[in-house]
Image (cartoon, coloured by chain):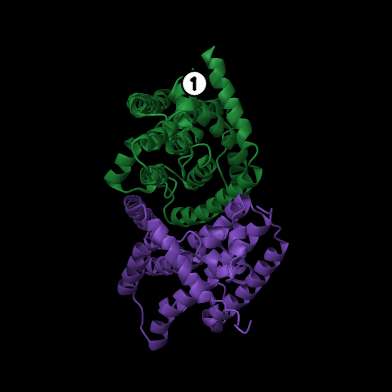
Amino acid sequence: MTLIVYALVVRQTFRRFLTYRAAILGAVLANTVFGAVKAFIVTAVWRQRSVIGGYDLPDILTYTFVAQALIGPMSLLTNNLDIPARVRSGDIGTDLFRPVDFQGYWLSVDLGRAAFALLGRSLVPFAVGALLFRLRVPADPRVWAAFAVALTLGVLVSFSVRYLAAMSAFWLLDEKGVTGFVNMMTTFLGGLTVPLILFPGWLGEVARALPWASVVLVPVNVFLGKLSGAALAGAYAFEAAWAVALLALGRLVTARARQRVVVQGG
Amino acid sequence: MDEAAPKPPGALVTYLASVRMWSRSAMQYRASLVMVMVYGTLVAGLELAALLIVYGNVRALGGFSLAEALYLYGTAQAAFFISDLLFTGTEYLGARIRMGTFDGLLVRPVGVLPQVFADQFTPRRLCPLLSAFGALVAGLVSAPVHWTWLRAFLVPYTLVTGVAVFGAIWVFVGAFQVVVTDASEAMNVVTYGGQYMTSYPLSLYGRNLMLFLTFGVPLGFVNWQPTLYVLGHPDPLGLPTVFRFAGPVFAAALWSVALFAWRGALRHHRSTGS
């Protein structure tokens, strides 16, 4: 029964985002153009060194446009959760009062947003990239299925990180410092600013072990067919382990926040 | 009534008064301001780190060594963020029109554009200048430049023309937002996209795009053309030397078109009456 409620929240959020068509058009345009500029830069790098970190030129071009396509679904630049605004306005009282789990409710909202972004913001940048540059698009439907699983786990990790940042609004008058800092980590360690495989030595190793490796790098590696069998299972386990750990931390924080909150009148 | 109506204040006075007002407003939440300033500095620093990471893998990009790339990057970022400091208020116009608060600026007996330029000004916009000038100075010190008086003059000259080109683009952003209030992100392609493109050698983008970035959207005059002269690189497009110094001409042309578009947009504007 509660699952139906969550599914309805996912659907309603999806429909809510449908109303912002003009803004989405602008975002799609920006994501596409930035993708093209980045593609020119990596092309110049790979012209001089044919393989870096196991990636050849079509691999890195594919990485570039998948990363641009995932800016929306993985929310790589912004926090995108309304929790802080609702804490300030007091509407959060309604959310806490709902007969569904608070964290589960916001996860459903975010899944609806991500699903919409995947359809509305991801397809065009990737398609344009595939037209202009030589990308590696999987032909095997099993790779696409494996990619869908990696994406879903990636969205869970992305949500759980952003949720922790947004929940800071229960303690801070202005959470923008915290959410901004976390967004910065996501953009950089998620491998959007520079592909993670260009990171030197230990910095690269650390970045590939952090949760943000789940939002772009792992899905791209699956998309490129670099992972199969035990390696694929290992990648899923990596994403799932971070998702479970961070969601559990989120539950702990939610319980604390619930004790703190004082809702005025009504 | 023999008393003459008071003379309306000039554009600069209006602009500075607005900047002062918004700065005081931003200072009200001091702890919050400090935090966003720290992270604003870090974000810009990470963009510079990105350039260093790329150069960790190659010795040159588009014929530019790391030192030369740092200079090019520094001029683009400094020009962009100075223009951001001065003009970026136009970005908030769409939101203002949707909220109905644009009318508040229109009814004041002072110029509209200076108020719009200063809109939502915050000292945070100073932060990215640290890494911009850091890269610029590092590039100047380490690049093998054959210094002449002309080359030395071209360094500040590059910043001024760069700010002028980006400034005209911010005016276009304002005009665009008055007409299309809810698709503001589309203009990010020329503003933040322009900042990104000019931070790397334009030679990376191929001949056609370079021609477009010279004669279409003249971002090539932000820093690329004068930098070719300072660093002693030939122009990959083979344009005559006079183009290295043509920035002000293109900037002036861009400003006249931008101001024309701005006036057209203002005439187009219909208040909701709120």
* Residue B158 visible: yes
Q: Quadrant of residue A251?
A: top left
Residue A133 image position (x, y, % from top left): 58, 49
In the image, is A155 to the left or to the right of A20?
left
Say if B62 sits above or below B181 in the image: below
Q: Quadrant of residue B131?
A: bottom left
| Residue found farthest to the front | B1
| Residue found farthest to the top | A1
Residue A107 image position (x, y, % from top left): 48, 27
Q: Residue at x 64, y 63 (%)?
A: B175
Q: Residue at x 43, y 23 (%)?
A: A229
Chain seen in purple: B
Say if A256 sits above or below A171 in the image: above
Q: Residue at x 36, y 43 (%)?
A: A178
Name the foreground residue: B41 vs A244. B41
Give the chain of mark 1.
A
Q: Residue at x 52, y 61 (%)?
A: B89
Disc 1: which residue: A98
Shade of chain A as shown in the rendered figure: green
Q: How many marks?
A: 1
